[in-house]
Image (spheres, helix red, strand yellow):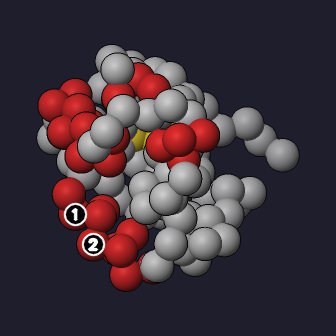
C-alpha cells in the first residue's frame, strides 16, 4: 500500500474525544461547567475559514439528529468517512476542522 502524505501546516488541526452530548463525560474528565459551549466557542475562535480539521473520533454520544445539528455550529466541520474511525453512537464518521495540533479536547476547554 502506498503511503499518503498530507501537507500539515499551521492551518491544520487535529482533535478527538470531544464527546458532545455525553452526560457523564464532564464528571469523568473534570470538565468545567458549560464545557460543550466552551468547546464550540473556542473551536470557532481558533478554526478559521480555509483551515482543515481532522476530528479523529468520539465527536458525540447520543442521537444522530443532535450531532447533525451540532456540525453547522463548528467552523470548517465537514463530515467525511475515515476507515477505522467508527462513530457507533451517531452512525457518523467525522473529520475535518479543528486544531491546536493536539488529540485531546482539553485544548479547547482550558
The secondary structure type at the circle numbered 2 is helix
- In the image, residue 54 sits, relative to residue 95, either above or below, namely above
Identify the residue at image location x=16%, y=31%.
Answer: 45
Instruction: Residue 52: name its quadrant.
Output: top left
Q: Determine which residue is flagged by label 1.
A: 72
Query: Which x, y percent locates residue 56?
Result: 57, 45
Q: Nearer the viewer, residue 46 or 9?
A: 46
Answer left or right for 109 relative to 47.
right
Identify the residue at image location x=45%, y=79%.
Answer: 64
Query: Which x, y percent locates residue 34?
Result: 28, 43
Task: Examine the rendering and report whether any part of residue 40 can be seen.
Answer: no
Q: Most extreme residue toward the right, as rendered?
A: 1
The secondary structure type at the circle numbered 1 is helix
Q: Determine which residue is flagged by label 2.
A: 69
Asked if the residue at tag 2 contacts the one at tag 1, i.e. Cβ–Cβ closer than 8 Å, the answer is yes
Query: Which x, y percent locates residue 75?
Result: 21, 47
Query: Which x, y percent locates residue 33?
Result: 31, 39
Q: Residues within 10 Å of mark 2 (few under 14, many from 20)?
A: few
Cα–Cα gap, marks 1 and 2 = 6 Å
Q: Nearer the viewer, residue 8 or 85?
A: 85
Answer left or right for 83 relative to 8.
right
Tag of residue 47:
none
Task: Examine the rendering and report whether any part of residue 75 can be seen.
Answer: yes
Identify the residue at image location x=41%, y=48%.
Answer: 96
User: How many labels were placed on the picture?
Assistant: 2
Instruction: Residue 100: name its quadrant.
Output: top left
Identify the residue at image location x=49%, y=59%.
Answer: 23
Q: Quadrant of the image for the C terminus?
A: top left
Amino acid at each position: 500500500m502506498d503511503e499518503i502524505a498530507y501537507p500539515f501546516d499551521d492551518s491544520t488541526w487535529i482533535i478527538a474525544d470531544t464527546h458532545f452530548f455525553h452526560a457523564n463525560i464532564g464528571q469523568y474528565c473534570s470538565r468545567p461547567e458549560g464545557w460543550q459551549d466552551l468547546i464550540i466557542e473556542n473551536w470557532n475562535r481558533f478554526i478559521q475559514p480555509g483551515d482543515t480539521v481532522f476530528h479523529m473520533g468520539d465527536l458525540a454520544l447520543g442521537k444522530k439528529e443532535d450531532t447533525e445539528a451540532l456540525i453547522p455550529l463548528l467552523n470548517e466541520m465537514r463530515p467525511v468517512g475515515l476507515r477505522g474511525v467508527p462513530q457507533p453512537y451517531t452512525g457518523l464518521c467525522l473529520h475535518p476542522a479543528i486544531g491546536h495540533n493536539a488529540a485531546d479536547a482539553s485544548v479547547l476547554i482550558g
